[in-house]
Image (tube, coloured by chain):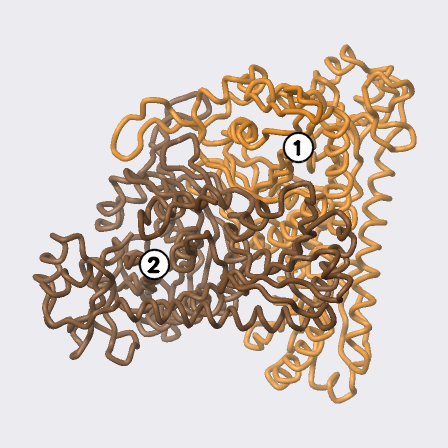
Chain colours: A orange, B brown
Amino acid sequence: MAPVLTLQSTDFPRWYQEVVAKAELAENGPVRGTMVIRPYGYSIWERIQAEMDARIKACGAQNAYFPLFIPESYLRREAEHVEGFSPELAVVSHAGGRQLEEPLVVRPTSETVIGEFMAKWTQSYRDLPLLLNTWNNVVRWELRPRLFLRTTEFLWQEGHTAHATYDDARDYAHRILHEAYEDLMVNVLAIPVVVGRKTARERFAGAINTLACEAMMRDGKALQMGTSHELGQNFAKAFGIDYLSAAGQQETAWTTSWGTSTRMVGGLIMVHGDDNGLRLPPSLAPVQVVVMAIKADVVEAAHKLGADLRDAGSRVVVDDRSDVPFGRRAVDWELKGVPLRLELGSRDLAAGQVTLARRLSGGKEQVALAGIAETVLALLAREQQTMLDDARAARDARIADVATVADAVEACGQGWARLPWAAVREAGEAKLAQSAVTVRCLARTDGSVPDSDTEPDLVAYVGRSY
Amino acid sequence: MAPVLTLQSTDFPRWYQEVVAKAELAENGPVRGTMVIRPYGYSIWERIQAEMDARIKACGAQNAYFPLFIPESYLRREAEHVEGFSPELAVVSHAGGRQLEEPLVVRPTSETVIGEFMAKWTQSYRDLPLLLNTWNNVVRWELRPRLFLRTTEFLWQEGHTAHATYDDARDYAHRILHEAYEDLMVNVLAIPVVVGRKTARERFAGAINTLACEAMMRDGKALQMGTSHELGQNFAKAFGIDYLSAAGQQETAWTTSWGTSTRMVGGLIMVHGDDNGLRLPPSLAPVQVVVMAIKADVVEAAHKLGADLRDAGSRVVVDDRSDVPFGRRAVDWELKGVPLRLELGSRDLAAGQVTLARRLSGGKEQVALAGIAETVLALLAREQQTMLDDARAARDARIADVATVADAVEACGQGWARLPWAAVREAGEAKLAQSAVTVRCLARTDGSVPDSDTEPDLVAYVGRSY
């Protein structure tokens, strides 16, 4: 049988496109760069969303909603911000049958409009910290769109907070980075992200510091999976986010913003997928187990088995399409990355057993139906850990420790390079850029996140990126 | 003490505006007609969303996402549809720094773009029914905006389904109306909606039939809380949603669409709110119980009590702001419509009791701390039922049974009128319209939803509406 997909080693970008299409995750929308997220792809996003939302709420932020349309004048108030986003804006000039007096920008992000409201809501130190988050769609015109990775419209959460002090703002930006983003990525998505600080060159437009989670894809390139920004007082000054301190002084607040998007789905595909398709970590998978009735005679038993597994707490689908060839169905569930398949036939059933196929190893074995729910739950937990371990080993094997920018460029043909930040600096970044390599982030030698880029002994992770 | 709000009887629209502002539900956005939904308002919406999403999924539909931008040409393919929406469209003419070749419409609803993809995904009868739902934001330019009720941008779910037969499409449109919409509104929002069929005049642009849930506000006006449309083959023909039948014939599908929006929050406010503010049904309330520490000496005990109630399954906030005057705090929780307040003082505590204040009745009583969790849960269930009963009684008292269009107009000064549809018809609708009265829906005398507007003995509910 011909392979279902182009091999990763043959053409990784084509493999990616094919997985997205054949696993029915997403398609291009009618307007260039836009995306239709199909039900299976959306069910993955919904689970990421729910896990992220719970973590953000645990960090104390509350959800709210801010408008899609922003007056163009708002963006101009923060100079770096408007410069950063201008080339990507979509502009509404007509509405309700007439030309608008002031053109409206479709939000590329909401710092400006939220800044306006934070200024209203922040009167005294008692109103701080003000911790907001919002789930919405944003638009940034993309010239080279790729489903999930770079789309003109994407779905995301953007958090926005205001604090009384620099320290409090900094701490919160770090807290979100670790407790919401890193925790979700490592423990649910099974993606071993490197967390660190961006260089000045790579900062968000208007930030004084950008923190990021960076993941390595199976082609050795980096994907920025989430960022958390300290905005200093830039937006607070531009929008008048002031407060009366406990001492009775009028003070300017410190703000942060942080975001993760549907791009994470792209990362999930490219970190775990193999030549047979998607592989989903059990903690995230919308379907953890598929019970396949091999023929019509076991459909009833398959539903009974499915119900038992569901009662035990697994997410289960019963595939009772006994009129569709078994091989085609099995290939389809592999493509979709379902961690475990239970293939039930009448002979199995009579013998009190079922065939268990593991997506991760590809192996098959007979297991007893007695105690199957426990077997499945234990295996799901084990596969989750294995996926994280495997991804970490694969990543580490492709990080080369080098000493010079030239060697770093060389190493980035296969993966990332790690070298002393002292050997890079702004001049080195410019040189790396000539080979389309960027500093993904700066970290301390113990892996922790530095407080500034002038700390001694920092290491730079560099690589090509999406 | 001066009343916190304008009385409903003095000026209902002003009362509404004030509740929305003072309970911190929402504010006007910077662009006319847009809305900022504040955290407390959004927490109400999130709970409505979760309840609705579960019901929609129980009806078999899957969530997906479709793009914000729709090529203008798509809208033109269905003649009535484009005519209905043209005056309300927002149009993007520039993006990415250049003029677009074809202007893009910001979706006012997604029938057209979803129709395009249904056509791709529907090949054979095996692909049907195709049951999709999507949560998103849509834009319809509003000349007379009102927070939650009519906003230029609003949040909603829109369901879109394709079926092999007329019957199957009709049944599904009715199923959503009853099992998702009516059930949520009655059993969670405690709003006794009238369900029925729209007249041809009031139908959705492009539908062959529109079903609706109509609620009566406390000023006697009607609010359309949700609609479910049979689209016949109009969109299927315009977008080529065909399928190969089991018999091997190429057939045209039948489609439906259905939606509910943030407008439901407006309905919730206007059905239940009173002169002291919002009143939220316990099943929906983001905060069901607030435990108020009267002074600093009971803060710890208040948190302990809060934790106990939470463990028992209530949604609880502990108000430990002992430095804010008690009266101000109590008024604020009343404004926000929290069903139960437990006011804890040191003397209460010593006596093993707490003061229970009920938002619904306004009454206060001493209750024992022993068994308090059970007391609270039982009371929440009772208040939920009371709110529904009260709303139904209030509605029924304001529905006048009349015989003629002239009497109906007269009665609509106070509430709704109910009269034989045979006494209205198209000519009567035109006459009602002169007094800004519309037929809200048609129902059978037993309250069930008619299959056509030519059935004998139908009754028309008529009223003024938002």
| A325 to the left or right of B178 | right
Residue projecting furthest to the bottom:
A350
Where does the N terminus of chain A fall, quadrant-wise? bottom right
Residue situated in front as seen by the camera: A24 or B404: B404
Write down the quadrant of residue B451 in the picture: bottom left
Amino acid on which disc 1 is placed:
Tyr
| Picture layout, residue A223 above or below residue A433 | below
| B460 to the left or right of B338 | left
Q: Residues within 10 Å of mark 1 (few under 14, many from 20)?
A: few
| A196 to the left or right of B190 | right
User: Does residue A215 appear in the picture of this structure?
Assistant: no
Of all chains, the one bearing label 1 is A
Q: Residues within 10 Å of mark 2 (few under 14, many from 20)?
A: many
Residue located at (88% from left, 33% from top)? A447
Query: Mark 1 = which residue?
Result: A466
- Tell me where residue A119 appears, x and y as whole percent: 55, 27
Residue situated in front as seen by the camera: A236 or B153: A236
Query: Mark 2 = which residue?
Result: B218
Write down the quadrant of residue A339 in the picture: bottom right
Amino acid on which disc 2 is placed:
Arg
Marks 2 and 1 sit apart, C-alpha to C-alpha, by 55 Å
User: Does residue B373 appear in the picture of this structure?
Assistant: yes
Residue located at (75% from left, 30% from top)? A168
